[in-house]
Image (spheres, rainbow, N blue to C red):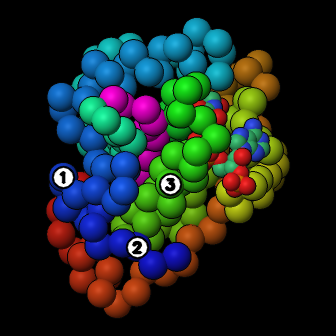
Amino acid sequence: MPAPPELAGPTAAVGPVRVAQPADAPALFRLSAAFAADGCLLPRAAHEFAERIGEFLVAVRDGELIGCTGLAELDDTLVVYNLCVAPHAQGGGIGRRLISAAAARGSRLGRHRLLAASKSSGHWFLRQGFEEVDPQRSPAAWAALIPPGRGSRLYCRGLSAPAASQQLSATHPRS
Ligand SMILES: CC(C)(COP(=O)(O)OP(=O)(O)OC[C@H]1O[C@@H](n2cnc3c(N)ncnc32)[C@H](O)[C@@H]1OP(=O)(O)O)[C@@H](O)C(=O)NCCC(=O)NCCS
């Protein structure tokens, strides 16, 4: 999928999804902590969101942070982690837009695929064009994304090469 150049800059946005800013860190922590308490997400301390803020995309509506995803680079792969949408905003396409923006970033960075580990949202990832992959037949770094005993599964979605115009934007500093 071609990468929208709108997400190439450090503060740019597409619809409700934009690159996270340092001031978003407390709200990111609060949103994510509720899912961690339910066991849907791995627990992360508040300072981790602040330290890794550059890896996050957020969805904001009426000033409220209603969704987020972390995106970590792993060789030629972009790992989707800590993806969540506030319960009252679920089912409205926010998760899908976060994944579209993740794919745009991955293509812009020249990554070949998105990869996600999920315990409870496997069907949702399949609907978003991901395929389940067998950790036993995957690179060790992929299998390491699954904490022992957690019961998560791995999901992968290929990314198309960026268009020539996006290849130019890939020479800009990472957002
Ligand atoms: C998974 C999650 C991010 C989806 O966010 P969302 O904003 O509700 O998803 P969307 O509204 O974009 O869903 C897009 C489509 O999937 C469908 N869908 C929603 N939840 C689904 C589910 N559990 N299984 C299958 N399909 C689902 C929607 O109906 C919609 O269908 P459409 O394409 O026909 O319109 C959200 O449910 C969530 O925060 N889950 C808990 C955290 C989690 O498990 N994260 C993944 C681990 S990284």
Question: Is-magenta flag for residue 99?
Answer: no
Ligand 1 near label 3 (Cβ, under 8 Å)? yes
**Is the residue marked by circle 1 packed among few (<14), some (14-19), or many (20+) residues within 10 Å?**
few
Q: Which residue lies furthest to the top in this view?
A: 37
**Element at label 3:** helix
**Element at label 2:** loop
Spatial CA distance of label 2 from label 3 is 13 Å
Would you say 22 lies left or right of 131 here? left
Q: Of the residues shown, which amino acid type is indicated by label 2?
A: Ala
In which quadrant of the rendered image does the C terminus lie?
A: bottom left
Q: Of the residues shown, which amino acid type is indicated by label 3?
A: Arg
Of pointers 2 and 3, the one earlier in the residue sequence: 2
Q: Which residue is drawn at 44% across and 58% down?
A: 101
Quarter holding residue 13: bottom left
Q: Which residue lies furthest to the front in this view?
A: 62
Decide if residue 49 is in sight here: no
Ligand 1 near label 1 (Cβ, under 8 Å)? no
Quarter holding residue 145: top right
Q: Which residue is drawn at 30% across and 87% down?
A: 165
The residue to which callout 3 is attached is: 97
The residue to which callout 2 is attached is: 3
Would you say 40 lies left or right of 112 here? right
Of pointers 3 and 1, the one earlier in the residue sequence: 1
Where does ligand 1 appear, by image quarter? top right
The residue to which callout 1 is attached is: 11
Q: Give the range drawn in magenta.
A: 64-73
Mark 2 and mark 3 in contact? Answer it, CB < 8 Å.
no
Q: Where is residue 53 in the image (x, y as percent from the top left)?
A: 28, 35
